[in-house]
Amino acid sequence: MPGLGLDARSSRRLRRLLAADVVLLPGMGLPQAVPPLEELADRLLAALGEGPVVLVGHSQSCQVVAVAAARDARVVGLVLLGPTTDPRLRSLRGLVASWLRTAVREPWWQVPLVLAQWWSTGPRAMVALWRVAAADDIDRRLRDVDVPVTVVRGTRDRLCRRDWAAHLAASAPRGRLVELPGAAHMTPQTHPGQVAGLLS
């Protein structure tokens, strides 16, 4: 699943390396009103096939896939790429500061691609998704996920700091942390080969 404001373009390079489907939801590729997390998870589950499936969330969509994984036996694995909602990012000031510290570590070639996706999703849906997901206790939700959970962060990511990612990995009964050297937050776009290696 794409992150906040992103759509299928954010994982295009990754999906060239492995067979995967993308589910777009409000605030994550669709410019629609954003319902509660539980309803977003229901929409994701309704879009899945018979299974088994490994759910992959990026950034703020990690909250949605965590809810879905705890609810459905078709889910046999969970990969969280740069999970956000670190309590330190719940204020607008903290979020903007961490986003700026991460943005300067991203390759500049991807800026037009990200901006095009944000424009398509729209600021209203993006803000609504942030409000719905920001206060979610994903660490508490992961305690109910009894499948392997891989938390992935780039070593240059300030939106998903190492201590937060390690905490989430430890929260899941079968969790582990993987760090991608030199990556920042947009790992599906910038490091598709390394991400694909974790999923194959």
Image (cartoon, rainbow, N blue to C red):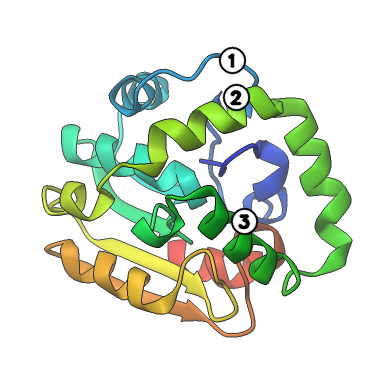
Question: First in sequence: mark 2 or mark 1?
Answer: 1
Tell me the residue that label 1 is attached to. 32
Residue nearest the viewer, comparing 135 with 58:
135
For mark 2, does the 10 Å Cα neighbourhood hold few (<14), some (14 to 19), or many (20 or more) residues?
many
Residue 99 screen position, x and y as percent:
63, 60
Residue at 46 percent of width and 42 percent of height: 61
Please provide percent x and percent y for residue 32: 59, 15
Badge 1: how crowded within 10 Å, few (<14), some, or many (20+)? some
Pointer 2 with pointer 1, Cβ within 8 A: yes
- Residue drawn where x is 56% and y is 55% of the image: 93
Pointer 2 or 3: first along the chain: 3
Occupied quadrant, residue 184: bottom right
Query: Mark 2 or 3, which is nearer the eye?
Result: 3
The image shows residue 163 at horizontal and vertical percentages of 34, 77
Residue underneath mark 3:
96
Q: Which numbered circle lies on residue 125?
A: 2
How many callouts does the rendering have?
Answer: 3
Q: Which of 195 and 134 is in front in this view?
A: 134
Residue 151 picture location, percent across and down? 36, 66
User: Left or right: where does residue 103 sit relative to residue 82?
Assistant: right
